[in-house]
Image (cartoon, helix red, strand yellow):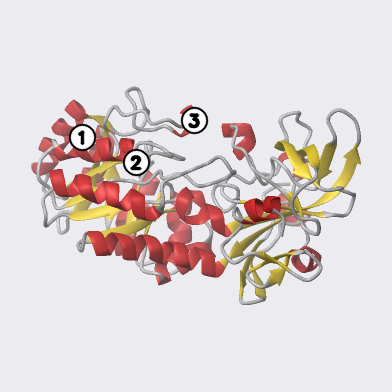
Amino acid sequence: MAASQQELLSLFPPGTVLDRDATLVIAGCSVTDLAERFGTPALIVDEAALRGRARRYADGLAARWTNSRVAFASKAFPCTAVYRLLAQEGLSIDVAGGGELALALAAGVDPATLVVHGNAKTDAELALAVQAGAGLIVIDNFDDIDRLEQLVTRDRQQAVLVRVTPGIRPDTHAAVSTGQAGSKFGLTLPQARKAIARLHASDVLRLDGVHVHIGSQILDTGPFVRAVEAVADLGTFDVYNVGGGLGARYTYGDTPPSVEEYLDALVDAARRGLPSGARIMIEPGRSLVAEAGVTLYRVATVKHGEPVFVAVDGGMGDNLEVALYGQRFEATVATRVGGGDPCHLVGRHCESGDLLSADVPLRDPRPGDVIAVPVTGAYCYSLANNYNGALRPPVVFCRDGEARAVVRRETYDDLRRRDLP
C-alpha cells in the first residue's frame, strides 16, 4: 500500500480498508455498494467507531475521576439514532434548543440526564425542559433566572448551572470561539458571582454548580486547563461542567491531543483546584462524532483547465463547514484511493463559495465516480439545508458488513409539505 493511501486511510473510521479491487470498505461495507443502494450524497456512519469513541471518553473520564459524567454536545449531530446509540453507551445528552430536546426525548433519552443550553432560550423551550424533567438547565443570563422562577412550581426545585465566560480565547476560528471577553455566551466572572448569589436565595432553583465552554476545534490542552482554573475561583459546588471543544483531525497536518491527553490535562487541573467529591462533567461533540462519519458523492462533471474542477452532486447543502469556517477536508476517488493531481472539488450549488476542498489530490476523476470525504460526522448533518432545492441526504449506519438507513433522503414532497394554499 502506498504511503499516500496510508495517510488518507488514517482519516477514515478505524478499520477502514481497501478490498481486492482497491475500493474503500467502511465497517465491512463497500462504499460503491453503499452509493448504489442508498444514492448520493449520503452520510455514512461507522457505528462501532462511534460506540468505541463514546466508551473511550466515558471509561477514560471515570478511570481518572470516579464521580464524573460525559454529555454528548448534540448540536454536532442531532439525529435520533445517534441520541439513542450514545444514551445506550451511558452518555448524558446536551441539547441547545427545543428541537434537539424533542429529538432526544423521541429517542428515549432519560430526561434526568439532559443538560439544556442556549443563550436565548424562549419561554416555550424552558417550559418544555421543565415539563420534561430535564436534569440540568444552564443559566446563560439573568433573564433565564426570571423565566424559570415563573415556570417552576413551588412544590419542586429545578437544578441549574451557571455558565461562565472566563475571558479565554483559544486558537480556533472566531466563529467557534465562545469563552473570550465579548462573547454572546454566558456571564462574565463578576456577573456569574451575582447570579450565584441570587440562585442561592431562590426557592425553586437549586444551584448545583457552574459551567464553562470556551469553543470548538481546539488543538491544545492549555486553554482547557485555564478554563478549569477560572471556575475554581468561583467557589465550592457539587458539579463542575467544564464543557467540550477538543478538536478533530480533519487533515494530515492536524495534531489534536488524544482523548487521553485531553482528559489527563482536565483532571490534573481539577485535582489542583476543585473539590475532590464534586462531579466533573464534560461535553464532547465534534471530537466524539466527526471521525465516524464519511460523506459519499458522485462526480457529475470534470472541467479540465487551471484549476481542474471536479463537481459532485452535493456540496454546501450537506457540508457548510468549508463556507462557514474555512474547514479543510480531504477526499479520494473511492475506487482509486490516494495519489493523483490537485483538483478543486466543488458542489452543485449556485455559489462560488460552494467549495468542498481546494487543491485536493484525486486520481483520474471521471463522471460517475464515487468520491469519499472523511471526517464529516460533526455538523454536516446539523447544518444541512435545502439551498437550490437540494434534498438533505440520508444517514446510513454500517456495522460488520451490514448497512441500514436511520434517516431517509428527503423528497420533493418534503419540500412542499409546509406550503399552504
Q: Is residue 122 left or right of residue 337?
A: left
Please state which amino acid type lies under the numbered disc 3.
His
Q: Mark 3 = which residue?
A: 173
Q: Mark 2 = which residue?
A: 221
Residue sitting at 21 percent across and 59 percent down?
65
Sequence-wise, which precedes: disc 3 or disc 2?
3
Residue sitting at 25 percent across and 45 percent down?
148
- Quarter of the image for the N terminus: give it: bottom right
Please state which amino acid type lies under the numbered disc 1.
Ala
Please state which amino acid type lies under the numbered disc 2.
Thr
Mark toward the viewer: 1 or 2: 2
Distance of label 3 from label 2 (alpha carbons): 16 Å
User: Residue 130, position in %: x, y?
Assistant: 30, 55
Q: Mark 1 = which residue?
A: 230
User: Residue 396, position in %: x, y?
Assistant: 65, 65
Mark 1 nearby-residue class (10 Å; few <14, some 14–19, many ≥20): some
Q: Which mark is residue 63?
A: none
Mark 2 nearby-residue class (10 Å; few <14, some 14–19, many ≥20): some
CB under 8 Å between discs 1 and 2 = no
The answer to which image quadrant residue 188 occupies is top left
Residue sitting at 21 percent across and 53 percent down?
158
Sequence-wise, which precedes: disc 3 or disc 1?
3
